[in-house]
Amino acid sequence: QVQLVESGGGLVQAGGSLRLSCAASEHTVIDYAMGWFHQAPGKEREFVATISQTGRSTFYADSVKGRFTISRDNAKNTVYLQMNSLKPEDTAIYYCAARRRSYGYTLSNEYDYWGQGTQVTVSS
């Protein structure tokens, strides 16, 4: 069982930046591909970004490409999401997820473990 805890959310003005962190309890987190998803009120959970087990490969939703960067530090069992040039439409709860299989999946039901989420609010 992998426990994931997100942090770093908050309120920021449009154009600002935030860095989200996802700390994993499992010491073998290197075995997991990791992803970030977000869910706005009244909407389904949507894919944001994913990173391979080694961190060499990443993939982003078109809506965040060029603005967000996913990274990981396996020695610290932590995954990050650097969010720059934030827009009001980025406002959502952001969830970290782990997948104990190959990387590159963008559907929420393809991930095995989830964190509780952290709120990101971008004001205009």
Image (cartoon, rainbow, N blue to C red):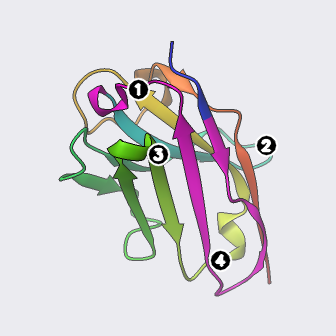
Q: CA distance from mark 2 to mark 4?
A: 18 Å
Q: CA distance from mark 1 to mark 4?
A: 35 Å
| Residue at mark 4 | 87
What type is the residue that disc 4 sits on?
A: Lys
Residue 11 sits inside the magenta stretch: yes
What type is the residue that disc 3 sits on?
A: Thr
Q: Badge 3, how many Cα within 10 Å: few under 14, some, many 20+? A: many
Q: Secondary structure at mark 2?
A: loop
Q: Badge 2, how many Cα within 10 Å: few under 14, some, many 20+? A: few
| 3 or 2: tag closer to the N-terminus | 2
Residue 18 at x, y percent in the picture = 63, 71
| 4 or 3: tag closer to the N-terminus | 3
Q: CA distance from mark 1 to mark 3?
A: 10 Å
Q: Please state which of residues 25 and 92 is positioned toward the viewer in this rendering.
A: 25
Residue 98 at x, y percent in the picture = 44, 30
Above or below, comparing residue 2 to residue 121 in the picture = above
Above or below, comparing residue 75 to residue 103 in the picture = below
Between disc 4 and disc 3, the foreground one is: 3
Between disc 2 and disc 1, the foreground one is: 1
Q: Secondary structure at mark 3?
A: strand
| Residue at x 50%, y 68% (from the top left corner) | 82
| Residue at mark 2 | 42
Between disc 1 and disc 4, the foreground one is: 1
| Residue at mark 1 | 27
| 1 or 4: tag closer to the N-terminus | 1
Residue 44 sits inside the magenta stretch: no
Between disc 2 and disc 4, the foreground one is: 4
Q: Badge 1, how many Cα within 10 Å: few under 14, some, many 20+? A: few
In the picture, the disc for residue 78 is: 3
User: Which residues, given as a range, are shown in magenta?
Assistant: 5-31
- Quadrant housing residue 124: bottom right
| Residue 91 located left or right of residue 114 | right
